[in-house]
Structure formats: C-alpha cells, structure tokens
Amino acid sequence: MEHEAADEQLQLKAAIWRTVDQIARAEAEKMGKTVSQGFVSSLADIVYAQAVTMATDLEMFAKHGRRSTISMDDVKLCARRNDSLHELITEAAQKISRKK
C-alpha cells in the first residue's frame, strides 16, 4: 500500500512536470525566450507543493464544517488571499451552478 502511494505520487509529480513544461515552453515561445529544465523543475516543485497545501486546507475546511465532502465554498475559502484567483473560482462556480 505504501509502495502504491509512492507510485501515485511519482505519477502525479510527472504529470505536473509535463504540464508545467508545456505551458512554460508555450509562454516562453510567445515572448521569444527559452526556459531551462531547472526552471521547469523548480516551478513544477512549487506547483506540487502548493497543490498539497491546498488539498490539506480543503480537507481541514470540510472537516471543520463537519462534512466529508469538499464544497465549492471550501475552494473559494482557499483562494481568499488571492483576489484574482478568488474571482476566477467564483466565476467558474457560477457557471457550474447555471449548468445544473
């Protein structure tokens, strides 16, 4: 079981690295720049660490609310210190609500 968790973690990190690499290269190309593997690796590590922190926070917010399911309000609460992210999440939540 511990081995499976480690494999899943490695797969997730690899997927994040690939995605960060694709986005960084595309954005750099638009600006006529290049990105190093070290930059991509460092940025991917930051993205992974932020995702782990956010997942932990989301679990705690739901637990504090005596719920076993994470809600959209929990996600908005996670983004409360980043105005632009909070706005994007709120807009996405409204779109999802309209589709229901």
Image (cartoon, rainbow, N blue to C red):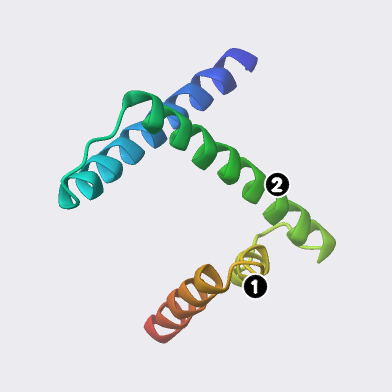
Pinpoint residue 19: horizontal percent, then vertical percent: 32, 40
Classify residue 50 as left or right of residue 66.
left
> Which comes before the other along the chain, label 1 or label 2?
2
Local SS, label 1: helix
- From the viewer's perspective, is residue 84 above or below residue 62? below
Residue ID at (84%, 61%): 64
The image shows residue 33, relative to residue 37, as above or below, that is below
Q: Indicate which disc residue 21 carries.
A: none
Quarter holding residue 28: top left
Quarter residue 2 falls in: top right
Which quarter of the rendering shows the N terminus? top right
The percent position of residue 29, horizontal first and vertical second, equals 16, 45
Q: Which numbered tag is attached to residue 73?
A: 1
Amino acid, disc 1: Asp
The quadrant in which residue 43 appears is: top left
Q: Locate residue 72, reporting x and y percent.
A: 59, 70
Secondary structure category for the residue under label 2: helix
- Residue position marked by numbered label 2 in the rendering: 56
Total residue callouts? 2
Placement of 89 over or under 1, stated as above or below: below
| Residue 70 x %, y % | 65, 60
